Every structure is written in structure tokens, then in C-alpha cells.
Amino acid sequence: MTTLFHTSLRWGAAALLAGTTLAACNTAQTSESDSATTATTTDSMATAPAAPAGPTPIRPTGPAPAWATGIKPEMQAVIETLVSLGGKPIETLSAQEARQQPTPADAVMKLMQTNNMPMPPVTADTMSRMVMPGVKVRIYTPKGATGTLPVVVYYHGGGWVIANLDTYDASVRGLVEKTGAIFVSVAYRQAPEHKFPTAHNDSFAAYQWVLRNAASFKGDPQNVAVVGESAGGNLAASVSMMARDKKVTMPKHEVLVYPIAGYDMNTPSYQKNAQAKPLNKPMMAWFFDKYLRNAADGKNPMISLVNANLKGLPPTTVITASLDPLMSDGQMLADKLKAAGVATKYQNFDGVTHEFFGMAPLVPQASEAQDLAAGELKNALMK
């Protein structure tokens, strides 16, 4: 029952944040897992309580935790709710068990339900395509779109081990609405079943697939960008590096949201936020252990971006959160990109944690961060 509850809650969260159930998706090319998502999400929505006249302000119920000095009230409320869902420490679990734990998206959904918050309108249609065995993409097209549109390839987070397209559905839909571009969200193979560099190679293969097939879904193959969160930010940057090195059409822009950019877990933010939620230092060690084959992989330029050759990469936007072990990774990467001559915009958001980016319905800083990302993407893709 616990597994079923958490699975339903996770999929329902994506639907609430996106403003729709996946039943509204174009199912002509939807995979079996998408069909299962539709059924689960619909059940979750069917049991949602009727909304009263107006939403209740989102506020925490207790004092800020010791690790979260200066945490914003909406962010703290999400963390409190996540804790209340009873998840176990990821670093104590198997990968299979970890994938069934409640997520920040679940906490956001519960808060929205509890506070009777209205759902935003549906702004994108989706369909799924297989890139190659084991790797699929979900294509988000703005509703009512006509003509050829720019394309953004998106890579979700989860330490290369956990999470999926549904977990990060809200981030993608928010950016689709704010940019008017087509987004292609990539479901790469995960560890420990598939060790490094599988997720990186899958991500580049999906990028190449988009370049070859963009016209089939009304996308412009000459007008492509990449976006990623956390491990996905690492993947997005690595895709740009591989495109440069293999002389493939480069992305016009990359947005890296709290990216994993190094193997050093003794940076200032790792030390300051060692016990943070929803990501902490022991979890990052667990992710590295599950994905990397050995310690030498941690020094590979595709993992240790801060030590990679960054020259010739596309203009980059780096977004970080102050209450996140990965803040120093993103800050150092932005500095290294600038030193390599890459046009780089960096912004850190105070008082929020890892995973805040997809919480725009609740956390004001998430909406601001999405506005920043969308603005930079539009400047790059829609000139």
C-alpha cells in the first residue's frame, strides 16, 4: 500500500502543478508507462476535495530547522510537508526503494490540496516517442501553436538514479508556458542498473534525435537549446560539450539549474548544507556511489564540469539555491564558464532549497527563477 500511495501521489503532483491530468495528453504515441500515469493521476484527481471560496496563505507550522537559517516561509512549508509524508533517508535504501519515496513534488501537491489552491490552465499537449531501446522522450507542444517553433531539450534531476519525467513535469510545463517553445523531456537510463556514462550517452543520443526529427513535431532543428536540473543540469552541460567536440549543431543556449558540477563534497555549500532537505551530503555520496563505476569517474570532465574544457560552449544561465549542497558547484561553474569566455548569467536565490525551481504555484522564488530561465531562452531562440 505504501508503494501504491507514493506512486499515485507523485504522479498526481505532476498533474496538479501542470494544471491537468495526463489524460489530456495526446495519447496517439504514448507509451505504456504514460498510460499507467494517466490512470493513476485521474484517480488522484477524482478524490481531491472541492475548493472553497479562496486559497489559504501558505505558511509553516513550526520554527525553521537548524540547517535552514533564513528559509522562506513557503519553502519551509513545503519541507515540513515533505517530512510529514514519512520518507526514509535515501542513503539508507536500495535504488528501487528510493524510487518509491515521497518527493518534493508530492509535498507541493499535498499543500495545494490542503489549501484548496486552484489549478492553472492546461497550456501544453504531450506525446511520447522512443529514441532508442530504453530511452524515450515526452514532447510538450504549446496548445494552439502554429508554424515551426524553437525546441528545448530538457533533462530531469534525481542523481542519475531516481525520479522520472512525471516528477519534473511541473518545471517543463512552466517553461513551456513562459517561452512558447516545444520542450522535449528525456527519460535516460538510470543507475545502478546503468552506470556512467550511460545517462550521459543517452542524453546526447536524445539531443541528436531531436536534431534529426524536430521537423516531425513542428520543431526547428536549427533553433535548439538545452535545460537541466541537478543531475540533469550536469547532463545538459555535458551534451553541449559533446556537441562541441563531435562537431554537431550546438545548442543556442543552456540553462543549468543547481547543476552537479563537481565531485568534491567538501565545498563551502556542502559543508554549510550537509544536513539540508530535500538534498544533503550523504544523499550525494549515495548518488555518486550508484552512478559512478569508480572514483576515477568522478574526475571525468562530464562529471567534474568545473575542471572541464569549457571554451566554445553556448551562452549559459546558471541558477542556484542558497540552502543546497550544490550551490558552490553552480557558482564555481559559472565563474569557470566566464573565465573560458562563455557569456554567462548567474543568479543564486536566497532562502530556498534544492528542487525549488518546479514549485512556482507555491514558492515565489521559483516563479522568478523560471522567468529568468524563460527570458534567457527566448532571447536566444526567438530573435
Image: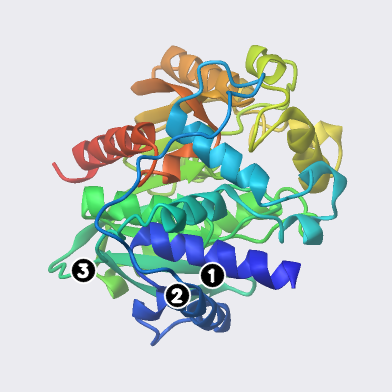
Q: Secondary structure at mark 1?
A: strand
Residue type, numbered disc 3: Lys
Q: Which mark is residue 128?
A: 2
Spatial separation of the CA atoms under disc 3 and disc 1:
22 Å
The dot on residue 143 is 3
- Secondary element type, mark 3: loop
Quadrant of residue 369 in the image? top left
The N terminus sits in image quarter? bottom right
Instruction: Describe residue 243's horizontal placement relative to residue 146 as left or right.
Output: right
Image point 40% across, 84% down: which residue? 27
Q: Tell me where residue 117 sits by quadrant.
A: bottom left
**Label 2, residues with CA under 10 Å away: few <14, some 14-19, many ≥20:** many
Q: Earlier in the sequence, mark 2 or mark 3?
A: 2
Q: Amino acid at mark 2?
A: Ser
**Residue bearing the label numbered 1:** 136
Tag nearer the camera, 2 or 3 = 3
- Whichever of labels 3 and 1 marks the residue nearer the N terminus, that label is 1
Mark pair 2, 3: CA separation: 16 Å
Task: For residue 257, say whether it is visible.
Answer: no
> Residue placed at 47% from the left, 20% from the top?
334
Q: Nearer the viewer, residue 303 or 346?
A: 346
Residue nearer the viewer, 375 or 117: 117
Tell me how far mark 2 sits from mark 1, CA to CA.
Answer: 7 Å
The answer to whether residue 332 is above or below residue 97 is: above
Work out whether residue 356 can be spotted: yes
